[in-house]
Structures are given as C-alpha cells and as structure tokens.
Image (cartoon, coloured by chain):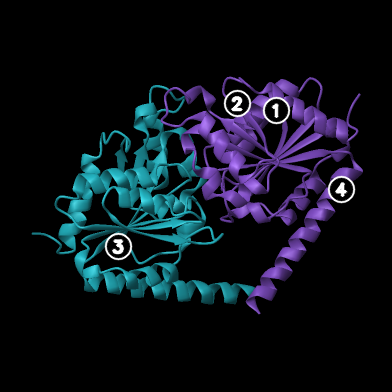
Chain colours: A purple, B cyan
C-alpha cells in the first residue's frame, strides 16, 4: 500500500514535469537543471555564465533553497531575471514548485532558463523539473569518490562541471582521478573542468549551452 | 490524512531513537552523530580522531552511505571497528537502520561510537539516531552562507567542526565570517576550526569527546 502511494506521487510529479516541458517547448525555452552538493559553486557558476552570455542570450534563473533569498539576489545583481523558491525544509525542488514559478515568468522573453536545485546530491535525482537537460556541479574539494557514492545523481545528468579547478595544486585530490571516476559511473557525460570564480575553462560549457539554444530554435 | 501518516512515521522513528539511546546508556556508550555535506571531510575527521584517541578509548564507527563500503574500509584500515550501512538510495540514516547495527556490535567493548550519516545537510536533521550528541562537519570551501541556508541542521547540533582550515589563505572564504554566521543561527554551538588532514586544531574536539566520555562514566 505504501509503495503504491509512493508510485502515485511519483507519477503525478512526472506528469507535471512533462507539462512543464511542454510549456517550455511552446516558447522555445531551453531549460537546464543545475544540481550539486551544498557549496559546490552552483550559484557562482550561474553568475559567471549570466555575465558571459548576457549580450546574446536572454536568461532567467529559478533558485531553489531551503530558505533565504540570497542566491536569487546574487543573480539579480548580475542583471539576470531570478526568482527564488524556498522549499521550507524540503530537500529538493519538484515539478509543482517549478510550474508555479513558470506561470510568473514571461517565457516569450527568455531563451535560456536555469533551474538551480537545493544543494543535495541525493533527493533531487528522482524529481524531474521538466528541463531539457540536467547538469551537476561537483567541486574538486569534495573529492574523487563522489560519483561512486552518489551514482544515481551522476547517471541522471548529461554533463558535469568540475568546479574550483584553481585548487588543483593545493588539494590532495587529482582532477584526472575525478574525471576517471565520473567516467566509470556514466561514460556518456560531458565533463567540463572549470573555475567559476575566475571563469577559466568555461568556454566549452558556453558552447554546449549555445548548441542547446540552437536545438531549441532560439537563434538569430 | 497525509500529515497524520507522516506524524505516525516520525513518532515511530523517535521512539526507536529513544530505544537506541537506552541501549547505549545501558552499556555506557557515548555516541555522537556526525553529519555534513558530501565531501565536508566527515570520514577524514573520524580517521584522524580514531588515530589520535585509540590508545585510551575503544571506538567504533557506523558509516552511512547511499552505496559503497569505501568509508567503512577507510576506518577499518585505521584499526577501528567500522560497520557500513548502505541506505540504498535513501538520503539519511534512521533509527531503525542504526538499531539493526547496534545488535551486531559488542557494546560492552565500546566506549565511543560515531554514527556518520549520509552526506546531506537537510534530510538527516529530523531523524535522530539515539546518539547523545550531534555534530556537523562544515568545510571552508562550502562557503560562509551555509548556516543561514541550512539552519535546521545547525540548530539540531551541539558542535560544528569547521574543516579544511588549511585552505583559509587560498579560498575567498573568511573563517571569521563562517564563525559569525554559525553564531547567528545557533549561539550555543561549540565551534572547532580544524584541518582533519593534518590534525591541526583537533585538540579541543578531542577534549570535548573526553568530557562526554567522562559524563558517560567511561573513564579509568
């Protein structure tokens, strides 16, 4: 009985995620889920991305956090349209929360939408938002064992930004080992070693976003 | 109806946690929950602690992870008795999982038991294990905003180890600000700035553990 209840809940979530995906498609909005552990640098990555791409691309960010509006403010300061969702204790965004915010956004004026989830490597895995792609931000200080310890999250994403690469010489963590461990859990993943703080290594990530935008017909 | 179901589940968890606490009391075992984000350095902290205290204190570790037995193996290599719980996708340990393992441990031969939770700053908050104390490991690279963003976790703990202090000069994160932010969310917390990798700053943490052991009558 309890399993059935859980299945019903998941079916409803998945149905709402498909509904969100259709709404995004209707307006040719390319949406990307951004996930990762607390402190991996998800917001910093988006700050840098918004700065770098703002000249050609109209972006918006949905910020998921247990509480505070800190992260939305950070993005707004960079000139992005940013809306904060406070989950009030819940450990992940779900499609209902995202649907509510989509109604408040003028999708016609958005090319690229980022949906930054709550900092958590587990719970968001099984809650699709309706975004076309999902990526994970994994910071070097977290260590090389994270793909193996949280495989479902890595298997649910099409790309991983290995962030804080500027610490490569300082930490007892080897980027090559991180890349190898990611490949063992999901061999299909795009891997982008970056430093969101300095912007180093971000070009391929931007290229991937531009390719997604082209796919969504969002190109002049 | 759904709220009632959730309340019943939580009541059952809390009852099992009290049951665990009684079992630990019966054998004068001082138990400490160790929580924190993925990659905060929880296991490294325990490796270092086991090494430093093994001469006088008999320790055991319960390791919670979504999957792999990596962390238990790491502790075993340091000579600790370590048992791995794989939650199989679940985002936190609960009192039932801990109860099952307690049955396998020879509590008579243990002074100090660490219960390392799954890497997660949210979900473990509301699932007590039965341990007498809870501490959180927060690593400097995670940034100074974590207490404010995950207040419930910080409010549920009596101490926080600010780990990876060796990176203080390298990161754009100021230890004083981290300490200040912790104080704003929970002014009662013990705060121990440490580097688990080198062992620096760990003495006060050991002292706190020894004080707990004395309280539990575990002293020669």
Q: Are marks 1 and 2 in contact (CB under 8 Å)?
A: yes
Q: Which residue is mark 2?
A: A194
> Callout 4 environment at 10 Å: few (<14), some (14 to 19), or many (20+)?
some
Gap between marks 4 and 1, in whole Å? 25 Å
Residue A9: x and y, percent? 71, 67
Q: Is residue A51 visible?
A: yes
The front one of B77 and A3 is: B77
Residue A161: x and y, percent? 62, 33
The front one of B137 and B181 is: B137
Decide which of tag 1 and tag 2 comes sooner along the chain: 2
Chain letter of the residue beneath label 3 in the structure image: B
Gap between marks 4 and 2, in whole Å? 32 Å
**Residue lying at 36% horizontally and 38% vertically, measured from the top left:** B163
Chain letter of the residue beneath label 1 in the structure image: A
Mark 4 vs mark 2, foreground winner is 2
Which numbered disc covers residue B132? 3
Q: Which residue is mark 4?
A: A23
Chain letter of the residue beneath label 4 in the structure image: A
């Amino acid at each position: 009985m309890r399993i059935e209840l859980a299945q019903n809940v998941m079916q409803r979530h998945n149905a709402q995620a498909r509904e969100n995906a259709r709404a995004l498609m209707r307006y040719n909005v390319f949406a990307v889920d951004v996930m990762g552990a607390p402190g991996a640098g998800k917001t910093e990555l988006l700050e840098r991305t918004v700065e770098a791409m703002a000249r050609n691309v109209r972006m918006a960010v949905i910020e998921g956090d247990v509480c505070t509006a800190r992260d939305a403010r950070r993005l707004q300061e960079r000139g992005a349209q940013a809306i904060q969702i406070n989950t009030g204790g819940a450990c992940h965004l779900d499609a209902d929360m995202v649907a509510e915010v989509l109604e408040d956004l003028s999708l016609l004026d958005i090319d690229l939408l980022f949906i930054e989830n709550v900092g958590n490597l587990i719970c968001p895995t099984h809650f699709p938002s309706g975004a076309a792609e999902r990526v994970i931000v994994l910071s070097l200080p977290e260590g090389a064992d994270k793909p193996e310890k949280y495989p479902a999250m890595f298997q649910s994403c099409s790309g991983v930004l290995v962030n804080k690469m500027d610490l490569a010489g300082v930490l007892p963590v080897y980027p090559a080992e991180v890349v190898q461990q990611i490949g063992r859990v999901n061999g299909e993943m795009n891997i982008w070693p970056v430093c969101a703080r300095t912007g180093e290594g971000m070009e391929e990530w931007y290229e991937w976003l531009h390719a997604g935008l082209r796919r969504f017909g969002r190109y002049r």
